[in-house]
């Protein structure tokens, strides 16, 4: 079967139209998977692309203006909470440098309600459940952790420094083998 120039142009237009519609639908779908910060009476929460409130405006501080995968907020006690883009609370995050812990080697520290430390990835998956008294971030595939010890505050002034003192430290691997 031989196509004439009219049929060829019609086929190209049809394919181009299908391609454009596919691109537009995929862009629209991605907007539905994001949450956007909103403010009400000085407190913050998140809405979806339609404007529906997904996370109530009860947080005095947000660290993430748009949640694509995970986002961070601070509650009234200063605890940092992690939510996914569906509005589900995932876990509390270790506070470092006045904000959520920085990811290192794809993982950041999380804490449970007893203060034990574990690790999660940047998609919000818990990789190592909280079970350590203290843990340093990962370096070269390993994290220095301890099951015992105490927090030391070297002074009470504005420039005070905190560190963890323990007589038993050990290394844990980044990835399961």
Image (tube, rainbow, N blue to C red):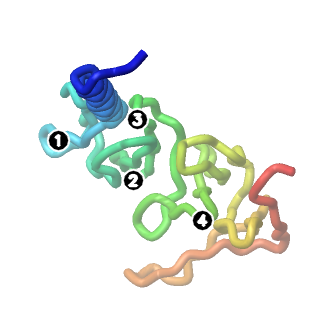
52 or 27: nearer the viewer: 27
177 or 46: nearer the viewer: 177
- Examine the image and state in which quarter residue 84 appears: top left
State the residue at coordinates (60%, 65%): 104
Tell me the distance, in whole angstroms, between the alpha carbons under discs 2 and 4.
Answer: 23 Å
Mark 2 touches mark 1? (CB < 8 Å): no
Q: Earlier in the sequence, mark 3 or mark 4?
A: 3
State the residue at coordinates (66%, 72%): 164
Q: Mark 1 highlights which residue?
A: 39
State the SS at label 2: loop
Q: Mark 2 highlights which residue?
A: 78
Mark 3 touches mark 4? (CB < 8 Å): no
Q: Earlier in the sequence, mark 4 or mark 1?
A: 1
Q: Residues within 10 Å of mark 2 (few under 14, many from 20)?
A: some
State the residue at coordinates (37%, 47%): 73
State the residue at coordinates (30%, 46%): 66
């Amino acid at each position: 079967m031989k196509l004439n120039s009219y049929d060829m142009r019609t086929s190209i237009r049809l394919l181009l139209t299908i391609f454009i519609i596919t691109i537009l639908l995929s862009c629209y779908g991605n907007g539905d998977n994001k949450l956007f910060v909103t403010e009400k009476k000085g407190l913050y929460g998140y809405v979806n692309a339609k404007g529906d409130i997904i996370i109530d405006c009860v947080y005095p501080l947000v660290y993430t203006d748009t949640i694509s995968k995970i986002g961070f907020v601070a509650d009234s006690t200063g605890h940092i909470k992690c939510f996914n883009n569906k509005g589900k609370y995932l876990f509390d995050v270790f506070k470092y440098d006045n904000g959520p812990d920085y990811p290192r080697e794809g993982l950041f520290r999380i804490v449970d309600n007893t203060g034990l430390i574990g690790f999660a990835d940047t998609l919000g998956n818990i990789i190592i459940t909280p079970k350590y008294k203290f843990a340093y971030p990962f370096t070269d595939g390993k994290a220095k952790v301890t099951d015992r010890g105490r927090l030391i505050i070297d002074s009470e002034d504005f420039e005070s420094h905190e560190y963890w003192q323990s007589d038993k430290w050990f290394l844990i691997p980044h990835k399961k083998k």
